[in-house]
Amino acid sequence: MKINSELKKYIEENLLVEYQKNEVGHGISHIQYVIDRSFELVKDNNLDVNYDMVYTIAAYHDIGHHIDSKNHEIVSAKIMYNDKNLSKFFSDEELIIIKEAIEDHRASSKSEPRSIYGKIVSSADRNNTIEDCLKRTYTYGKKLNPNATDEELFLRAYDVLNNKFGENGYAKFYFKDKKYEEFLKEIRNLLKEKENYINTQRSYIKKLKKENLF
């Protein structure tokens, strides 16, 4: 996927470093994952889109998470829209679409994204591996409640993931994608047995701590 080299350089040098302020589940590795998945969805579904816009949306979508995690989609969209440097690369109309896509990316949103770009980043933001999913729910829970025990965090994560990915979960995916379909089948199977789920998450968190990543 061909991306404007000046735009890419600007974002890599001035934006991506800001993700060091986020907790690990919404850090730079997650952003790179969402960028890669966005373009994977574009390619696999033959989507006719502006690649620079796709890249920028994915790069900015969680930038405000450390400021206000509960409203981070609004904060992140505002940070992007106030970045005057982007006017060198996009028209006013394109910047509005980018802003709306960032605002619309959250899985728990009750409304469908307003554009194909919002659907891309929203879908790309969904995990497609059990390990990443269980690590992210733990680290985010820890950020919300630093004094919680691991057992309390595991139980919170179990409830969160049931609401999100269970048979009647709210998480939506807007494209045909084998990776996500396999993940959804696997996570639902894991969630059927709470004890097995907790033991699985405990093993991943033990590994995370051993690697000093949390």
Image (spheres, rainbow, N blue to C red):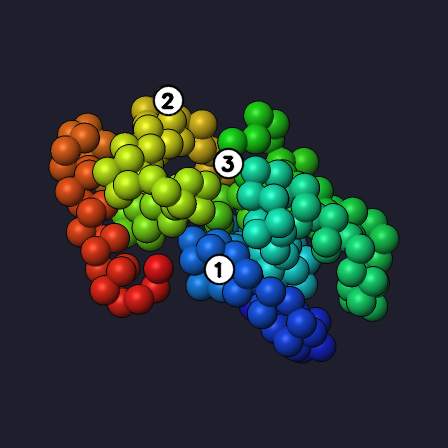
The mark total stands at: 3
- What is the three-letter code of the residue carrying label 1? Gly
**Image spot of residue 7 (x, y percent):** 70, 71
Q: Label 3: which residue?
A: 107
| Closest to the observer, 27 or 190 | 27
- What is the three-letter code of the residue carrying label 3? Ala
Q: Secondary structure at mark 1?
A: loop
| Closest to the observer, 151 or 16 | 151
Residue, far front: 147
Q: Secondary structure at mark 3?
A: loop
Query: Which quarter of the image is occupied by the C terminus?
Result: bottom left
**Image spot of residue 184 (x, y percent):** 31, 38
Q: Secondary structure at mark 2?
A: loop
At horizontal 55% and vertical 61% (from top left) the residue drawn is 21
Q: Nearer the viewer, mark 1 or mark 3?
A: 1
Labelled disc at residue 168: 2
Q: Label 1: which residue?
A: 27
